[in-house]
Image: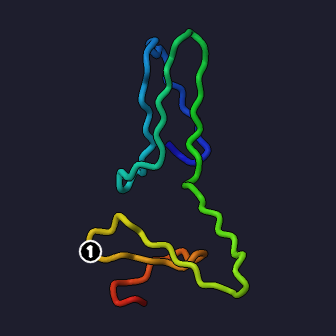
């Protein structure tokens, strides 16, 4: 399903349905939703962009902020907030 495309799932039964959105290349889960279809009406689900974390610096000096990826199995990966790339294992 392409960006900003819409699909329609027809003839949905009256029960709870689990929906998942996954990346085509990796199969990584992007979003999921459970919809309890309890009546014959239209339902919708919007897959949003990844979550954001808002960081507000109220400390009296400029700071460097890092985020650690806790799912890494070999070593903690960090990236500076605003950076779009992860450092390598050597720290670069």
Q: Point out the residue furthest to the left here.
A: 74
Residue at horizontal 58 percent and vertical 75 percent from the top: 81
The answer to whether residue 61 is above or below residue 23 is below
Quarter in which the C terminus is drawn? bottom left
Give the color scheme: rainbow, by chain, secondary structure or one colour: rainbow
Quadrant housing residue 53: bottom right
Front-most of residues 10 and 80: 80
The answer to whether residue 17 is above or below residue 62 is above
The answer to whether residue 47 is above or below residue 89 is above
The answer to whether residue 4 is above or below residue 91 is above
Local secondary structure at mark 1? loop
Label 1 Cα crowd, 10 Å radius (few <14 / some 14-19 / many 20+): few
Residue at horizontal 50 percent and vertical 26 percent from the top: 35
Q: Is residue 48 left or right of residue 79?
A: right
* Residue 11 position within the rendered picture, expressed as x and y whole percent measured from the top left: 47, 14
- Mark 1, residue position: 74
Q: Is residue 9 left or right of residue 90?
A: right
Residue at horizontal 43 percent and vertical 15 percent from the top: 15
Quadrant housing residue 41: top right
Q: Is residue 6 left or right of residue 89?
A: right
* Residue 69 position within the rendered picture, expressed as x and y whole percent measured from the top left: 41, 69
Residue at horizontal 54 percent and vertical 74 percent from the top: 84
Q: Is residue 62 left or right of residue 6?
A: right
């Amino acid at each position: 399903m392409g960006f900003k495309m819409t699909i329609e799932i027809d003839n949905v039964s009256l029960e709870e349905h689990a929906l998942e959105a996954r990346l085509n290349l990796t199969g990584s889960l992007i979003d999921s939703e459970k919809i309890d279809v309890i009546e014959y009406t239209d339902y919708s689900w919007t897959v949003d962009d990844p979550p954001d974390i808002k960081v507000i610096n109220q400390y009296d000096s400029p700071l460097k902020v890092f985020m650690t990826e806790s799912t890494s199995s070999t070593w903690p990966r960090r990236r500076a907030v605003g950076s779009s790339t992860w450092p390598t294992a050597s720290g670069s």
